[in-house]
Amino acid sequence: MSTLNLTLLTDLYELTMMQGYFESGSNETVIFDVFYRQNPCGNGYAIAAGLDQVIDYIRNLHFSDEDITYLSSLGIFHEPFLSYLREFRFSGDIWAIPEGSVIFPHEPLVKVIAPIMQAQLVETAILNIINHQSLIATKTARVVQAARGDGIMEFGLRRAQGPDAGTYGARAAMIGGCIGTSNVLTGQLFDVPVKGTHAHSWIMSFPDEYTAFKKYSELYPNACLLLVDTYDTLRSGVPNAIRVFREMRAQGIELKGYGIRLDSGDLAYMSKQARRMLDEAGFTDAIISASSDLDEYLIDSLKTQGAAITSWGVGTNMITSKDCPAFGGVYKLSAVLDEKTGEFIPKIKLSENTEKITNPGNKKILRIYDKETGKIRADLICLADEEFDPSQDMIIFDPIETWKKTKIKGGSYTLREMLVPIFKNGECVYTSPSVMEIREICIKEKDTLWEETRRLANPHDVYVDLSDKLYKIKSELLEQMGRKSLAL
């Protein structure tokens, strides 16, 4: 999958527009922004993920002979345009927020600066990759939050929407905070820990439960996690597990990474009873793991009930983000280069829905941190050439409800530019960290959020404001568009 040519992973209208630009001789340099409008899952933030796959996609972007033959067979593309596609390569610039970063609505996650034919072609694939992995990473961050420090294992491959969603979804889940995945291909491709126990069928294939447990312990003495709910959890499963653990100890086997897994029933009650039985037998460090259609709400509830579970296997609800199946990222034109002046002309998209009006111009994002705590105060979207002095007072305001203003005293904050260069003139200038390194980045990023923003329900919104200059340009464009519509 890592070397797959995804050039035709695009919507047909991208190619028909490209042909229109080609035949009209219009190929000016433009800027497109990738952003989203609402945090998924009712969350207070999202997690950026998928950039490494975007890099692979751009690097491998070319039309093969088979691609050209197929496009020709559609009967809508002319030979001069097809000849152009044969030599097509991406030559533009791409900026992006690094993977694992916490992100917020309306700010550019990816900025593409390229001739419009190139910028148009890459829209669909970039959105497909960023939307999917950012969604799963964000959902996972919620599940990890609910577990309050317990380990989360990703178990969702068999319920994911196909091999790619299962494999790259597991990658995103690792970024979001999982300690391992059951997906062996993800483990191979991205060098992340793979984990798992055994199925009920393992138990059922032996004459009795004890024999199944005994054989498993002989095979995997250092990872003996036994599934105890095939027949009767408390009368059979847990007692048989304890019997096997006693025999292992008697044989001088050091018990580590051992315990039981619950996959059905009242997990709060069962785990408490199992904990009592294990402790009375002297296995106070035995793991109690749970699965069974878990999500952040059930895990949070079980933790509140005092469930004696310390490890969680989460599948369907996380790998599909079942309650929120789409991220909602969009790709919008924000500026066109004036060849005469070398300056970008800001462009804006209007809408009857205020939330869908875009932010124009060539932009960057400055993250404002509280100097004392290291927590995020706000994000400021501003023009790419704007500079701010953190020793000076800064006044920020809500771009919709403009009367809401906050003064941040000079010397009390620090600034960080969020967008970093990924491609320059078609060449990649960025080295992606490993998935496990991105996971650590994500942990640190989440620590910059106030607890009020991290809560699962009704989180506090982080302010995403516009600079004075950007707000003025946006207001002027809105006024111009309004006058034009009146003239019509």
Image (spheres, grey):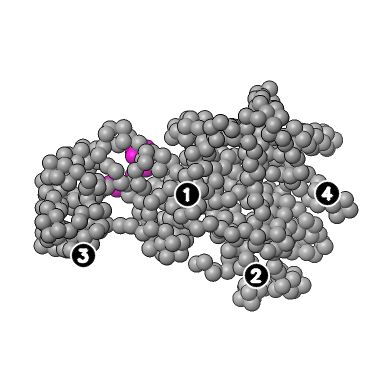
Say which amino acid is labelled 4: Glu
Q: State the image quarter where residue 410 is shown.
A: top right
Residue 134 on image: x %, y %? 52, 49
Q: Is residue 17 visible?
A: no
Image side of residue 161 versus residue 248, left or right: right
Mark on residue 440? 1
Residue that mark 4 sits on: 343
Q: Amino acid at mark 3?
A: Leu
How far apart, in angstroms, are the residues tagged by discs 4 and 2?
A: 30 Å
Q: Position of residue 177 (x, y in %)?
A: 43, 48
Is 255 magenta? The answer is no
**Is disc 3 in contact with disc 2, using a CB cutoff of under 8 Å?**
no
Q: Is residue 121 left or right of residue 258?
A: right
- How far apart are labels 3 and 2 at the CA level? 48 Å
The residue indicated by pointer 2 is 62
Residue type at mark 1: give it: Glu
Alpha-carbon span between mark 4 and mark 1? 39 Å
Residue 266 relative to residue 190: left or right:
left
**Marks 4 and 3, how far apart in space?**
67 Å
| Cα distance between the residues tagged 3 and 1 | 33 Å
Give the label, 3 or 1, closer to the camera: 1
Closest to the camera, between mark 2 and mark 1, is 1
Residue contact between numbered discs 4 and 3, judged by CB atoms under 8 Å: no
Residue located farthest toward the right when viewing the structure as drawn = 340
Residue beneath label 3, please?
A: 219
Q: Please tell me whether mark 1 sits on a helix, a strand or a loop.
A: helix
Q: Nearer the viewer, residue 486 or 55?
A: 55
